[in-house]
Image: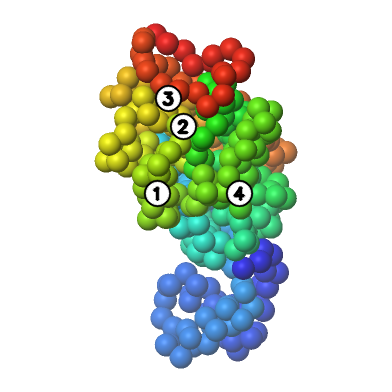
Amino acid sequence: MGTKALSTATIRDVAQKAGVSQSTVSRVLNKTGYVSAATRARVLRAVESLDYSPSAIAVGLSKSRSRIIGVIVPQIFSPFFSELFYTADKIAEQYDYRLLLCNSDASAERERRLIDDLLSYKIAALFITPVEGPEGGNTAYLNSIRRSGIPVVCVDREPEGIACDGVYIDNFGACYEATREVLEHGWRNIAYMADPPIYAPGRQRLQAFEAACREFGAAVPPENRMLAPIEAVQTREAFLREIVHRAHPPKAIINFSKGWDAAMLRTITSAGLRVPEDIFLTGLDDDGALQAYGYYTNYTPGTPTVATAAANLLMERTLCTGPLPAPVRNAIRTHLKTFLKPGAALPAPDVPPAGPNTTKQG
C-alpha cells in the first residue's frame, strides 16, 4: 500500500455528495442526534468515496483538545514497547494526561485507521513507531498532521521523508561494537539474527554487522543469517534449532532482536550445548536470562533512557501553547559490551584473536 496523502475534501463536499445538510453530516460523524439508517449509509458512502478525514484538519484547528495522547506501536507484546509505554505513561500522568495505546501489527493500512480513530478523540499529541517497509507507510499523512498543529513524536523507527520530532537509537554504533567484540575473540563460525532490513533499525544493524565483518575479513554465509520480523517466532526458532544441531554449530550468535535471549538459551541447552563454553551469546537488550550463566550484556544507555528521552520530548511538544518548533531528531548514542565472570570458559577461536580483548571479566 502506497503512502496516502491527507484528503482535501471538506464537510461541505460530503454534504453535497450525500444530498444532505452539513449539520446532518456532523451528526453522523459525531454519532449524535437522530439520523435515519438510509441517510446515515448515504453519508458514510460519501465520506468513503471522498476519503474525507474530519480528524486531522478539524482537530488540528480546534482549540479544545482532549488530555489524551495517542500511542501506536507495531508490536504491543515487545518488551521494548512495553517499557516505552510504561515510561511515557508515568511522565504524562505528572501533567494529568492519559495515554491510549494501539497496536498497528506492523500494517500501514491498520496504522492509518488507528491514526484516524485517535484523531477523532481530539488527541493532544501522537506518539508513534511508524510502519515502514514494502507495504508502504503513512509518512506524508503524519507530516500533514503535524503541520495542522498536532504534535507527532516518532520513536525507534525513522521513515524516509519524515518531518516530525523523533528519538532514535544509534543502532549502528551498538551493533558495530557487538560484532567487533565477537570477531576480536577470533570466532569466524558465527550466526546473526535480526529484524529484516526493510525497517530502518534492521538496515542499520545489518550495515553495522557487515561493516565489522569487512574490517576483520570475516565472511558469514547466508545460512548463518536469520533476518525475520520479531513476530515470526516459528521461523526464528527453526533457524536456531537447525544451527545448534549442526556437526559444527556456530561458536557465537549475535542477536540483534530484542527479547530473544531466553528462547536462544532454551534451544542451545536442549541440544546439549553450554553457554558460554560452547556458544557465546551477545546482543541487544539483555533480558536477564544470561545472568544465570555467569555473564550479561551491558547495553548503555538502555531502553529506560531512550523511553524517558522520547517521553520528555513528547510532553514538551504536547504542552507547547504556540506554533510547534521545528522538528528535532535525537539520535541516542549507545554502547554494548559483554561482562563475564572471572575464569569463564569460552569457545576456542577459529583464528588467532585480533586486537585487544574488549570482553571484561569481573
Q: Amino acid at mark 2?
A: Ala
Residue at x 68% of width, y 53% of height:
143
Rounded to the nearest whole Å, what is the CA distance between mark 2 and mark 1? 15 Å
Q: Name above or below for residue 145 compared with residue 361.
A: below
**Quadrant (top left/top right/bottom left/bottom right) for the N terminus:** bottom right
Residue placed under numbered mark 1 in the picture? 242
Q: Earlier in the sequence, mark 1 or mark 3?
A: 1
Q: In what element is the residue under mark 3?
A: loop
Amino acid type assigned to the residue bearing label 1 in the image? Glu
Q: Earlier in the sequence, mark 2 or mark 1?
A: 1
Provide the residue designation for mark 4: 197
Viewed as shown, does residue 82 lie left or right of 333? Answer: left
Query: Residue 286, labelled with which disc?
Result: none
Q: Give the quadrant of residue 218.
A: top right
Q: Secondary structure at mark 2?
A: strand
Q: Is residue 347 visible?
A: yes
Q: Picture coordinates of residue 237 (x, y %)?
A: 37, 50
Q: Of discs 2 and 4, which sits in the foreground? A: 2
Find numbered disc 1 in the image and state the secondary structure of the residue it sits on: helix
Where is residue 139 drawn, in percent x and y?
66, 55
Q: Residue at x 53, y 21 (%)?
A: 185
According to the image, label 3 marks what residue?
Answer: 347
> Is 163 on the left-hand or right-hand side of 251?
right
In contact (CB < 8 Å): disc 4 and disc 3: no
Check contact, mark 2 vs mark 3: CB within 8 A: yes
**Residue 262 vertical placement versus 298 (above, below):** below
Numbered circle sitting on residue 252:
2
Q: Earlier in the sequence, mark 4 or mark 3?
A: 4
What percent of the width, then of the height, locates residue 116? 53, 62
Q: Amino acid at mark 4?
A: Pro
Quick one: 212 or 19, which is closer to the camera? Answer: 212
